[in-house]
Amino acid sequence: MTYRQRLSLFVFVDTCIVIAAVFFSRFLVNATLSVITLPIIITAVTILLSHHLLSFKLNLYKKSWEYASIGELLIIFKVVTGSIVVAAIVQKITVQETFIRLLVVTWILHMILIGGSRFWWRLSRNSFMSLNKNKKKTLIVGAGSAGTMVARQLLKNQQSDLIPVAFVDDDEKKHNLDILGVPVVGGINKIQWIVKKFDVDNIVIAIPSLKKKELNFIFQECAHTKAKTQILPMLEDLVTGKIVVNQFRDVQVEDLLGREPIQLDIESISEYLTGKTVLVTGAGGSIGSEICRQISSFCPSRLILLGHGENSIYSIEMELKESFCESHIEFIPEIADLQDARKIDLIMRTYHPDVVYHAAAHKHVPLMERNPEEAVKNNVIGTKNVAQAASWNGVKTFVMISTDKAVNPTSVMGSTKRLAEMTIQQMDKDSHTKFVAVRFGNVLGSRGSVIPLFKKQIEKGGPVTVTHPEMVRYFMTIPEASRLVIQAGALAKGGEIFILDMGNPVKIVDLAKNLIKLSGNSIEEIDIEFTGIRPGEKLFEELLKEEEIHEQQIYPKIYIGKTSKLYIEEIETLLNTFEKMDKDELRERLLMIANRKEDFQSVLSI
């Protein structure tokens, strides 16, 4: 119904109500059928004109009555009372008498009929919507302001296919209460029972301020049901209209890490990035590109995007130019191979970066087991080339991205990253450049992460392949990893290995189960298949060896490792001879040096 149609309808209805109220009041007060008299006609016309004028003045005809509440009732009170007061004044002027009893009865009838007609509109609409049998029964977790807003909008929104049937909340004061006609039936520990009792199809977590640990606990309760679980976006987005109530997002795996994301020391980072020249290697990769995005928010003067793949570098360049078009940052793409020492040095001499983030590396564990020589070329020689060029050209801070697989490595990839760490730690001793490494675990959503693989397997109907039921890993998000790398540069004094407090490690099989659940399937529908540990893998990863650990945090959730013994001569010997070795011999020597085995000297002398 258009506004003009609504206006015409309400003006007609109100006119009938006012006339009926006045003449019926005359009948009630005087007990006579002679209701059409001059004073009554004057009173009726006065109240009618006053009612319409005040209704337009107070926007009574613009109200959406399907959402009527106390505010609308107050406007009706003002309109009706104002009309009666005006009628009393007109009576006094025209007939020199005020019919008090008549006006009081008219006021009562006027209020009841006008208010009743409006709220009947709301009640009839609610009754019509309640007949909709196709809506999915929804349990709302959280009976606070956000949960109430969700329930209200679900009840009123015809486009939504959800209908709230119950609340759960751990606040016992709310138990057994009704909110908008929806009962609060218990706490979070009763979710499974409530889903069965009410035959719930959907669960909406409506607590925007929820911490990660609390969200993880709630989701684990929801995961034991067959209901689809979704989460309310930030309440501010609902209030500002960025998000509507039927745009709940699915719970993401990163919501379930059980810890809060790392926060940045904006002041210290701004001091060493704003207005500076920054170079990022591997800028087209998942980690490198996110580092570029976050660096750009600090407005460096120039950002050099260095990478080997032209398509990925082009993509991140276009994205940054569009996203930061008003920041006056100069984005400079450079295509180069880290093994080309001359080209790397030329780039450094051309731009003289203040800070270098070294994100380029070969990271795929099984592939590097098959190609150990390529891991050496890219991860060790490539890192050495970039680090030397940085030192020769006066770079102030060099931040290398490492991995938890560099601790007690059992793989070629982990070993080469450990050798790269040793290389830059040694260079820190002989250079004015501050060299640091940042070590963290698996990154959710990165190209080498298990998450994209699991999602593809789930889309195909399974099975989801997990190497071992006891396999555990530390996990973090791409933005979180990038923040750590950026923060490390601000904290760097030289020679450190920075480590993030990543909370508790996560079982890969539990991660797979959560992803299956998040996709709307059950474990019975999507099988999990164990394939066995792959070459170079181990059941768990450490972030530091015992002799490397500093117990004190230097920044919330960031630890610093002690510098251990560096085997630089042995690394140089390996780099000079690795091309003559077969894959097995090279793999063995990498592991011996990285793990500081006492017998690697005798192996090298053969």
Image (cartoon, rainbow, N blue to C red):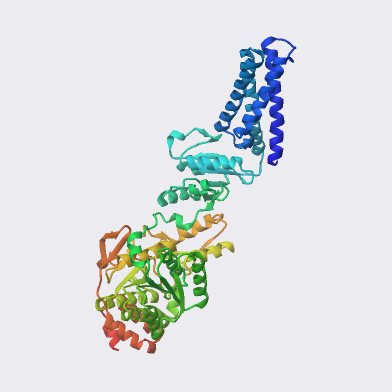
Q: Residue at x 36, y 67 (%)?
A: 273
Give the residue drawn at x 43%, y 37%: 171
- Residue 402 spot, x, y in % from top left: 36, 71
| 516 left or right, relative to 472 | right
Which quadrant of the figure has residue 381? bottom left
Identify the residue at image location x=45%, y=65%: 327
In the image, farthest residue toward the top: 31
Q: How many marks?
A: 0
Q: Position of residue 26 (x, y in %)?
A: 69, 14
Is there any visible trace of residue 547 in the rendered image?
Answer: yes
Instruction: Tell me the residue at 69%/25% (across/down).
Output: 17
Nearest the camera: 106 or 224? Answer: 106
Q: Quadrant of residue 120?
A: top right
258 or 272, which lies in front? 272
Percent position of residue 29, x then y: 66, 11
Q: Is residue 160 above or below residue 457?
A: above
Instruction: Relative to 334, say whether 167 is above or below.
Output: above
Q: Nearer the viewer, residue 353 or 19?
A: 19
Q: Is residue 195 visible?
A: no
Left or right of residue 405: residue 9: right
- In this rendering, the answer to whether 497 lies above or below 232 is below
Expressed as whole percent of the image width and height from the top left, the position of residue 95 reads 66, 13
